Amino acid sequence: MLNFHSQIKAPFLINAYPFFAYKDNPDEISLDYVLFRPNPGMRDPDTGLHYDNMLYAQIDSVYSAIRQMGHNDIEVQVSETGWPSKGDPDEIGASPENAAAYNGNLMKRIERNEGTPGRPSEPINVHVFALFNENLKPGPSSERNYGLFYPDGTPVYNIGLQGMAHNGTNIELLHSIDYFLVKIFLNSIDIQIRKESDQIQEEILPSNTREKLKDQKEGGRLQIPKLKMIGPQVPKQCNFFSGLSSQIHLYGLLIKEQSREEKEGKKKKNVVLVDRRI
């Protein structure tokens, strides 16, 4: 698998959740250490590197394992990380305050283009889970409460991403995100638009999103550039512009977009939100 990643220059994706480590061992693991708050940190006895948060230690541990397998040219990206705003009684640490601290402090770190202690000159790419609470998901309560927004579009807590008047603008933003995610999904697999899909769109998409998708049809097929392919059906990259983020991780397919900042020659943003509703 690592040889394949090296050959096609694809990142190695990991799901890293310091929350689970803290939940299982709150007496031994500092809450400040997992929430990126000031703390004494920990020193790696093998490398001598100092870590002030668990996420960076988890990332470097994966780099170390990959290096021991003979690869130094594979980038590690965090395909999922997050913190639940609510949990069952035994899910210690699940709260809106801790979720806001984890995601908010993480984004501040990413905005500074920080690298890990093991790779300080290489800014990390992080995919924050999740954009929406998954209110119908089974399992512990925490599984339904990782989102920044409730399913109706209202914020669960504020980490500075809203920045909008409370006049329905949030809902318009979410409809716009719905449109782009659906457009990416439909085109990434290059499906033929049929009556069945029209019926599905009628059932699951907001009316303004359906109209936008309808405008994109030409000859029964959505029109955007096709994915570049490397090897046997390996999607590499799809370039488009939405101005929302620099990368979106959607069902294991890494789709890169050109952000508004990149188009204007400004600093790249490396934090993205993951929505599993499609």
Image: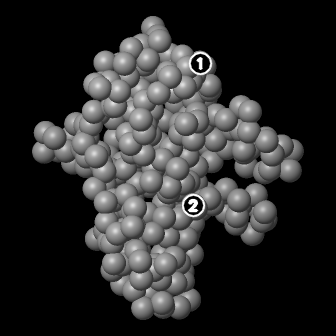
Task: Look at the image and name its color scheme.
Answer: one colour
* Position of residue 143 measured from the top left corner of the image (x, y, whole percent): 72, 44
Left or right: 211, with 60 as reference point: left
Is residue 18 among the parts visible in the rendering?
yes
Question: For this view, does 237 lie left or right of residue 58?
Answer: left
**Residue at horizontal 57%, vertical 66%?**
54
Dot 2: element: strand
Q: Which residue position holds label 2? A: 15
Up-down relation of residue 252 to residue 51 (above or below): above
Q: Give me the residue at 58% from left, 49% from top.
A: 82
Q: Quadrant of the C terminus?
A: top right
Label 1 or label 2, whichever comes before in sequence order? 2
Q: Nearer the viewer, mark 1 or mark 2?
A: 1
Disc 1 marks which residue?
A: 203
Q: Is residue 120 left or right of residue 154?
A: left
Badge 1: residue crowd in 10 Å (few <14, some 14–19, many ≥20): few
Residue 116 seen in the figure: no
Given residues 268 and 34, the one toward you in this image is 268
* Label 2, residues with CA under 10 Å away: few <14, some 14-19, many ≥20: some
Q: Amino acid at mark 1?
A: Glu
SS for tag 1? helix
Residue for point 48% across, 47% down: 250
Three-letter code, disc 2? Asn
Q: CA distance from mark 1 to mark 2?
A: 32 Å
